[in-house]
Image (spheres, rainbow, N blue to C red):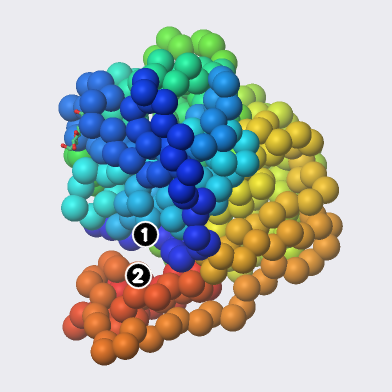
Amino acid sequence: MRFSALVSGLVALVSCHVTSAAAEIVKRASLTQVSNFGANTSGVKMYIYVPNSLATKPAIVVAVHYCTGTASAYYSGTPYAQLAEQYGFIVIYPESPYSGGCWDVSSPASLTHNGGGNSNSIANMVTYTISQYNADASRVFVTGTSSGAMMTNVLAATYPNMFKAASAYSGVPAGCFYTGTVNGWNSTCSNGQSIHTQAEWANTALNMYPGYTGARPKMLILHGSADTTLYPQNWNETMKQWSGVFGYTYGSPQKTLAQTPSSAYTRYVYGPYLEGIYGAGIGHSVPVMGAVDMEWFGITGGGAGGGTTSTTTTSAGTTLVTSSTKTSTSAATTTTAAVPGGCTAARWGQCGGIGFTGCTTCASPYTCQFSNNWYSQCL
Ligand SMILES: *[C@@H]1O[C@H](CO)[C@@H](O)[C@H](O)[C@H]1NC(C)=O
Ligand SMILES: *[C@@H]1O[C@H](CO)[C@@H](O)[C@H](O)[C@H]1NC(C)=O
Ligand SMILES: *[C@@H]1O[C@H](CO)[C@@H](O)[C@H](O)[C@H]1NC(C)=O
């Protein structure tokens, strides 16, 4: 029913210096829950981070957590809040209402524009934030990891009118997890066995908002070749889906950039609306690349195609600035701190990875299984 992903640890986040104006709904520079953002029939929780350095007409980044994750875990495990301080945008961290912490990317409601599912609740958070903060409706972005990447693809398909750009870390195509039930798990898809034609995948996405003919978000799809939670075929299928939507020829990128944005990865540039980043030997999940996202979203300059430098923020809290054409980055030193006194992590729980400081032993009969340098899980 659930799997999950990377991240943990990471850097002490910017906090302090509260400068809240009377009209503001939340304290600045602090992850805060918002309880009245609009219709919320699927019960998703909304958390928001408004930086001290809020821009006059701020952009919005929606950052969607992985299974077993929370808004708080994604806030502290990814660089978006620090980047918000740097660039003045607002971050929305939605939180799954389900016990496993996965997103509903399987029901007709969530896979339909204004269908009343999780995707609808998240869209309502965006609408609310735009009006509350006079945010820039033309600069709303979405990103997510694992189940959050699935939701990122679903949001791009159900609310193409709302998002300008998206980045999906280790997800599946929009609609691939369909089961007809809420919060279902489609193992055919997770195992990489849901294989369709480009036209079929494109239509699956297009049918989530029938009749819509306007602009669509540009898509950046990241995946690792050694992913055994959401098999790597899902990268190929997702590239098929969006290349179909945008009219690119699947399998014929305009540019293929080796060792970009860092040594393990190859970046495939289909055109302005679609790029893929595929990591050789990288498992589930690809670590969040804050600088790559900022560039893809147009928050920083340079444009697509793996610019000159990129910053990879690892969950260990180190920031690795690497030239796109040079090597480095490999974070092979997995250290898992033992918890004094000992404790056990539950099934599906994280039990290791760079920067992880929680329980490293799994509750019987589960064992701690290595997924990637950043993530081991009790399975
Ligand atoms: C959405 O549902 C969650 C969970 O029931 C609740 O905490 C939150 O207050 C709701 N928000 C709105 C706007 O209804
Ligand atoms: C998963 O999706 C495939 C279609 O790609 C479908 O045939 C299958 O029935 C789905 N699995 C479940 C459990 O619904
Ligand atoms: C999926 O894409 C990767 C990266 O281009 C490639 O190595 C792999 O062969 C592709 N898989 C299939 C089944 O086409």
**The C terminus is located in which quarter?**
bottom left
Kind of residue at disc 2: Gln
Q: Secondary structure at mark 1?
A: loop
Query: At x 32% / y 88%, what residue is drawn?
Result: 340
Q: Nearer the viewer, mark 2 or mark 1?
A: 2
Q: Quadrant of the N terminus?
A: bottom left
Q: Identify the residue shown where x is 28% and y is 25%.
A: 37
Residue 350, label in figure:
2
User: Could you tell me which residue is drawn at 50 percent across and 60 percent down?
Assistant: 12
Extreme bottom residue here? 341
Percent across and percent down for residue 272 are: 71, 29
Q: Position of residue 222 (x, y in %)?
A: 58, 49
Near-viewer residue (207 or 64): 64
Depth check, front residue: 215 or 204 = 215
Left or right? Give the position of 26 relative to 328: left
Label for residue 4? 1
Asked whether disc 2 touches disc 1, contact meaning CB atoms under 8 Å apart, the reply is yes
Q: Amino acid at mark 1?
A: Ser
Separation of residues labelled 2 and 1 (CA atoms): 8 Å
268 vs 343: above or below:
above
Is residue 357 found left or right of 180 in the rendered image?
right
Is residue 325 or residue 94 the one in the foreground? 94
